[in-house]
Amino acid sequence: MTERQHRPVKAYRNPSFLNSKDARALRILAEYLEPKSRFEHHSVDDTIVFMGSARTLSREQAEAALRKAENGDGKLEDARMALKMSGYYEAACELAFRLTQWSKALDPQTRRFVVCTGGGPGIMEAANRGAAEARGKNVGLTISIPMEEFDNQYVTRELAFHFHYFFMRKFWFAYLAKAVIVFPGGFGTLDELFELLTLVQTHKMKKPLPIVLFGTEYWRQVIDFDALVRHGVINAQDVELMHRTDSVDDAYDWIVRQLAEHALGQPGAML
């Protein structure tokens, strides 16, 4: 008897089905189970999440762009602003470096408080870079969007994830987070910040979650939290859900103090 020329394809090996709308639930579940498996394999229980603009340049890049603009190649005003904003890149890099060093010194047998970012350029690259320069593992949660491809070379490769669904990516930001540091950013950063604030405000997130807003001038101009209080749409104590600072030393000291008080004895996710 001759072998059939066309064998039936198993459902879990059928790309036309797996990429169809009927398999959406499987794809969503995969973006939960596959990261969960990898996090467990690499013993990542807790993260310190860095958020901020993908457009922020390093000081070296910004200085080079300014020199080009001064020579007539580019807008001088934009280049000067990019140089000013590059201070946030340097601050994120230093803060991630120091927090990774602190984390590594806690217990060499465990991996606590791993730096986690969206895996992209800008502030995300800076934080991954700081963690990598401290020789610590770090996480990158990238998302598929119709933008130019980028390579954040500082993400630990076995902890580099790529998501299709924004809500699953944001789940993994929140689920393992024990602290969040938010640098100046655009729509994506604001979206992530307000979702976390909503979870904390409504007590849907049970664990303590220290949130730092880094860059007081930026945040004061972009979001008037006091106006929200004056208009009666949030309570005065809701403003205290965030610690605002311009100092790497202050941010480091405050986060370490919060983690030592609330998280050191409680590894793992606690939504």
Image (cartoon, grey):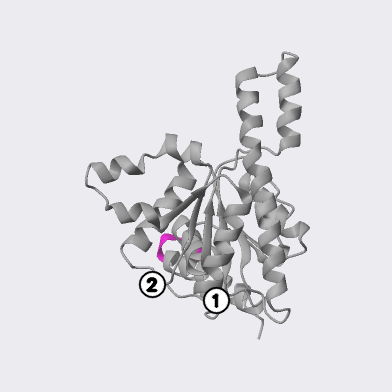
Q: Residues within 10 Å of mark 1 (few under 14, many from 20)?
A: few
Q: Is residue 81 magenta?
A: no
In this rendering, the answer to whether 109 lies above or below 102 is: below
Which residue is the site of mark 2? 206
Instruction: Describe residue 107's horizontal placement relative to residue 175 as left or right.
Output: right
Residue sitting nearer the eye, 161 or 60: 60
Is residue 117 shown to the viewer in this render? no
Residue shown at 33%/60% (left/top)?
201
Q: CA distance from mark 2 to mark 1?
A: 42 Å
> Which quadrant is the C terminus positioned in?
bottom left
Residue 123 point in image, percent of width and height: 62, 46
Residue 29 point in image, percent of width and height: 47, 70
Task: Give the magenta-colored segment's residue range.
Answer: 18-22
Residue shown at 62%/38% (left/top)?
56
Type of amino acid under label 1: Lys
Residue 239 point in image, percent of width and height: 36, 51
Type of amino acid under label 2: Lys
Q: Main secondary structure of the magenta part?
A: helix
Q: Is residue 21 magenta?
A: yes
Q: Which mark is residue 97?
A: none
Which residue is the site of mark 1? 10
